[in-house]
Image: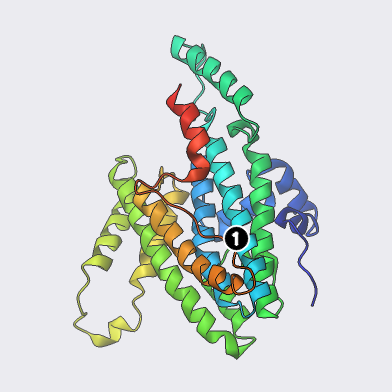
């Protein structure tokens, strides 16, 4: 079986001059370009981090369902751990010296104070700030590719990394149908997809309610989410065969993001996504610990308030601004 090349950026570089141009000039490189086109558009650093979190929530259960041996479980858990830690490093960095959406012509007193605080933040951390976001994004892309590689190594079938990066259900379907024994895995993946789409739908609906400047694009988001939650049986039973209310919510949210929605995830929504990771990690950890009782696994420790351990150092710096 042909091995994936480590690092989605490296894969992208092999695709031609257009990919190289994107590597040099597009946020997130060619991977960022593909994610913007095929997954969710992200207009800023926070949204890019949240998009990776959604990818993590979709990918981890898929990896866990493909595992059969203790060695596969250990390798898979290690891949997920690395990916999560890289995402959290990226999140923490984006909080430090956050880049403004607008730059004033003359610095105000507040700008000077923030600038001095930023200097202290840069000096106080070796993990990086918003100014090193692109370099840290490469680390996330590389670990994401490693997790994808592990999933398809577990599948023992080959796939196309460029298409798989979007974690699009149709592409996963095409891959899994090459081996019919994997159909139950597809069902598990799509069940997770429905949950993640619901979380995303609520997050875009609540973001829309807080932003009054996009009524044209936000109205369908709110309407479709409320229709999903309050739906009733259609008078014409044939209509139900063609309705995909969860996909409708996801699509409406994607359109809103494409048109500038300031999309954020609340603490409960982030924790809900990470609970999907933890459920999958529980399976991996239990299998891996058969051979190694001391194996720590990839389960994430979440506090009641949703504050994540990897963020603590960044939160302390921000609190002292």
Q: Is residue 314 above or below residue 12?
A: above
SS for dot 1: helix
**Where does residue 6 sit, x and y in percent of width and height?**
76, 59
Quarter occupied by the N terminus: bottom right
Q: Is residue 55 above or below residue 134?
A: below
What count of labels does the image hold? 1
**Where does residue 57 sit, x and y in percent of width and height?**
49, 61
Of 174 and 316, nearer the camera is: 316
Q: Residue furthest bottom?
A: 180
Q: Label 1 neighbourhood size at 10 Å, few (<14), some (14-19), many (20+)?
A: many
Would you say 53 lies left or right of 139 here? left
- The way the protein has been coloured in the rendering is rainbow
Of 298 and 50, nearer the camera is: 298
Residue at position x 26%, y 59% in the image: 223
Of 122 and 183, nearer the camera is: 122
Residue at position x 68%, y 40% in the image: 135
Residue at position x 68%, y 60% in the image: 145
Q: Is residue 76 above or below residue 307?
A: below
**Where does residue 94 sit, x and y in percent of width and height?**
54, 36
Q: Is residue 82 above or below residue 179?
A: above
Residue at position x 53%, y 38% in the image: 92
Residue 297 found in image quarter: bottom right
Whether residue 302 appears in this view of the structure is yes
Q: Residue furthest front?
A: 293
Q: Which residue is mark 1?
A: 80
Would you say 165 lies left or right of 58 here? right
**Where does residue 154 sit, x and y in percent of width and height?**
66, 76
Whether residue 266 appears in this view of the structure is no
Would you say 245 lies left or right of 19 here? left
């Amino acid at each position: 079986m042909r091995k994936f090349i480590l690092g989605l950026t490296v894969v992208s570089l092999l695709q031609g001059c257009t990919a190289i141009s994107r590597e040099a000039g597009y946020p997130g490189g060619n991977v960022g370009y593909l994610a913007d086109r095929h997954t969710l558009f992200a207009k800023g650093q926070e949204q890019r981090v949240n998009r990776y979190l959604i990818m993590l929530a979709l990918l981890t259960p898929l990896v866990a369902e493909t595992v059969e041996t203790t060695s596969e479980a250990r390798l898979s858990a290690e891949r997920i751990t690395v990916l999560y830690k890289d995402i959290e490093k990226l999140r923490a960095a984006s909080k430090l010296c956050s880049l403004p959406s607008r730059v004033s012509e003359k610095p105000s007193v507040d700008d000077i104070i923030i600038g001095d605080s930023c200097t202290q933040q840069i000096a106080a951390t070796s993990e990086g700030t918003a100014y090193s976001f692109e370099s840290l994004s490469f680390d996330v892309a590389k670990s994401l590719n490693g997790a994808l590689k592990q999933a398809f190594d577990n599948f023992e079938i080959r796939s196309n990394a460029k298409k798989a990066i979007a974690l699009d259900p149709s592409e996963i379907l095409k891959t899994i149908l090459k081996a019919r024994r994997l159909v139950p895995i597809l069902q598990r993946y799509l069940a997770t997809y429905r949950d993640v789409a619901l979380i995303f739908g609520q997050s875009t609906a609540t973001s829309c309610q807080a932003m009054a400047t996009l009524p044209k694009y936000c109205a369908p988001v709110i309407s479709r989410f409320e229709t999903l939650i309050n739906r009733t049986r259609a008078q014409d039973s044939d209509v139900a065969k063609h309705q995909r209310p969860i996909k409708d919510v996801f699509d409406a949210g994607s359109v809103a993001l494409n048109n500038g929605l300031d999309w954020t995830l609340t603490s409960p929504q982030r924790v809900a996504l990470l609970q999907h990771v933890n459920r999958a990690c529980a399976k991996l950890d239990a299998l891996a610990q058969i051979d190694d009782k001391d194996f720590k696994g990839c389960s994430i420790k979440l506090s009641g308030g949703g504050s994540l351990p990897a963020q603590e150092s960044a939160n302390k710096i921000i609190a002292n601004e």
